[in-house]
Amino acid sequence: MLYIIFYFQVHQPFRVARYSFFDIGSTRSYFDEELNRFIFNKVSEKCYLPTNNLFRELILFSEGRFKISYSITGTFLEQAKMYRPEVYESFQELLKTGGVELIAETYYHSLASIFDLDEFIEQVAAHLEIIEEEFGYVPRVFRNTELIYFDKLSDVLLNFPQIKTILIEGADRILMGDSPLYPRFSYNHAHLLLLKHYKLSDDIAFRFSDRGWAEYPLTAERYVQWIKALTLGETEGRNLYLGLFMDYETFGEHQWKETGIFEFIKRVIELLLQEVDIRFIFPSEAYQTLNYTPKGLSVPTPTSWADTERDLSAWLSNPLQWNAMKTVFEFLRKAKERNLTWLIPILKKLTTSDHFYYMCIKYFQDGDVHKYFSPYDLPENAYRYFINILTDIEAKTEA
Amino acid sequence: MRVLMLTWEYPPFIVGGLGMACYGLFKALAELGVTIKMILPTKDEVFFEISKPEEADYPVAKKDDNNRYQEEPLKFFPYLYVAPEETTYASIGKILSTGPNEEAVKSKVSSEVPHEVVQRLTFILSQGNHLLHKVSLYSNNVLKLAEKINFDLIHAHDWLTYPAGLFLKKKFKKPMVAHLHATEFDRALGYGHPVIHEIEYIGLNYADRAIAVSHYTKSIAIEHYKVSEDRIRVVHNAFTAKTAQPRKIKKFKEPVVLFLGRLTPQKGPKIFLEIAKKVLEQGVRVRFVIAGAGEMERELMLEASSLGIGTYIMFTGFLTREEVEEALSMSDILVMPSVSEPFGIVALEAMHFGCAIIISKQSGASEVIENAYKVDFWDVDKMVASIIELATNQDRLRELQGKVREEVKNFTWRKPAEEIIKIYREILA
């Protein structure tokens, strides 16, 4: 049997204002309320509302055979309730179909797992709490920000006994030629690791509308053929698990409606539903369906799904990013020590990984992707605004 | 006295200190009765008249001596701006070949511009380089406009306008002053663009007088451009305050040390960074602010952040005029670690805003300012020691800040303007 695990990341950051050196000491807001509202509404119309609608129909039409999973960040939920309650409600509706699993992550979509494990545990706990509060749901699967994973993370997650499964990137570096279709155990055998099939995932997420791609234009029929071909290599009857993990904004936002992405995904799902040997499952169901004991997998240094390097370089490859991130976690630790309750939520919002992504200055293809997502014209400016804000915080807390 | 001023910068179109110097000087000249007709690199064929001091703040755009120009706003093409449309301009050779204006009064020029020099300049300007192309278009524009303007002499500021100045001198047989605010040796920190060197050489040597903004710059002109001693004069820059004693703003708990200028090797921002690093390493709480934009910005930011100093070295990015003043108001110490600085008006401005100053000896300003720490640009340790002394000794800092506020009052533009009028008289006599 080939099991398909669809997983989508749903996230919006609180982008910071173009906070100049001369704003320090003023009462100007740190976050660009107008921009965040604008982007949220834009993406809601292009992606969240139509895609939720499409998936809801497909779940109902398939009588629950089509299944998907989401991780929805705390910052997204805050924005949805503030800027577009109908998006929030639409996720509630979607959940009621029973065809949706919710996945745990850090509330602020941060790199706390790299910088401050206490803060990491706090942010995961806060996310579990909001998911239970808003959806009455207790996640049993975890995915770290941008699929960042390393051995130690599995140890740390033992703090949350309900978590049994972790989603990770099927990076070549850790698989060393093995197939990403077979789940693995974490190095301590505490968690089941489900791997992203990056080729088939990125075919949709990144390459679908790329006119320079040899397979352009990709049809649903051809894509389904590729999926079916995956089973040919398995001769011992072991179940295969195809992890199609991507940003939810792939639908309608990264790939515009005009590219035919909605028709494509609908057709792919319809075709897959017709296959007898292919089934959709929730990530948490992988454990029960395994008909063999998975191998262990050691990941000593962090992997992620970002950029071609699939490591931390999207957020931590230059000193601007290091200094900014180091400083914000430092300030957060101090704020907690001094119990500055007004400041803690602000600093936590500043730990969101997107802020550091905008400061990236890697060139070539990835640079373009970073630029596309950045609300600021230059990485230098992203850094400048961020440091100015931290300086203002520093001045206000010292006063 | 009617002076045709050729300059590439004038407020609000400023790239560096040149625009500020022109503003101060022109206003003071107007106070002394000089009528200024200024040609800027505008797309429109206009010049600007300053006949009263208050007009220096809002020069009047004119098509010719009698007609005001209506259209606003004017389009400029300084350095990186759009290139002007070529079709509106005739070739320089063609304009010059129409021969000298017969009505010109008997020539006052001390030396003719030889035909070969004109040919050479025309050839240089016809090269593909983007900036040279703009210089060529500017020169064209100047030649055409000058037909409609009455003037007694030409005063060209820096190399971008020297070709136009020499062409005018050739055509109208009026004397020319070449003002040297900065040389290519300063900008490039050594040998720079050969063509720019050549234009500077020609401009300074075929002008009737050259004016350097410091002895430091004069010595460069004599040593490298072989300008003869008796034709070059030093007139130091000055600073005329627009406002009365500005108030100090306290924005940070710790003292603020400011770098203010373009982020180019000439201005020594890397030296500033090195100073910051050493001061912070010694545990002295000082906030370093690097104000300005430029080609080295990314490099500097990466280096600064790699020191892991959190928020203690800050970068403001490009500043407007108002922001420059605000930055000065909130700073306690200004460091000008320029590697080669013809003058450095920013030092005077900082004094007006009550900043203690640490300036490199390789600057014209250090020739005239008394109350300053003057340090060789490479002597980082000495600059570090000076900052620590001031940052840890409030009394010493306040005392020095009080002194510079007084001293800067002596540096008005009136004296330089008088010296320049003397030079005008010499060459018109």
Image (cartoon, coloured by chain):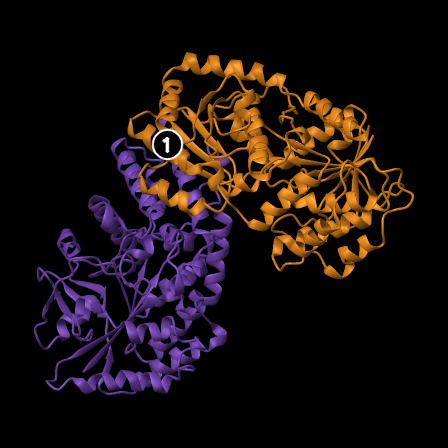
Image side of residue B367 versus residue B48, left or right: left
Q: Name the residue nearer the viewer: B94 or B386.
A: B94
- Write down the chain letter for disc 1: B
User: Is residue A163 or residue A320 the one in the foreground?
Assistant: A320
Q: Is residue B32 visible?
A: yes
Instruction: Look at the picture and state if B122 lies above or below A388.
Output: below
Is residue B333 shown left or right of residue B173? left
Q: Position of residue B305 (x, y in %)?
A: 35, 42
Decide: is B19 above or below B82. above
Q: Residue at x 43, y 62 (%)?
A: A368
Which kind of residue does numbered mark 1 sit on?
Ala
Task: Identify the residue at horizontal 24%, vertical 46% (top origin).
Answer: A115
Where residue A283 sits in the image (x, y, percent)? 22, 69
Above or below: residue A133 compared with residue A172: above
Q: Nearer the viewer, residue A164 or B147?
A: B147
Q: Which chain is orange?
A: B
Q: Quadrant of the N terminus of chain A?
A: bottom left
What letter labels the chain drawn in purple? A
Occupied quadrant, residue B149: top right
Residue A28 seen: no
Circle 1 SS class: helix
Q: Position of residue B362 (x, y in %)?
A: 49, 29
Graded by Cα atoms within 10 Å as few (under 14), some (14 to 19) or many (20 or more), the crowding at tag 1 reads: many
Query: What residue is shown at x 54% (from left), y 20% (from top)?
Result: B369
Where is mark 1, residue-wise?
B276
Q: How many marks?
A: 1
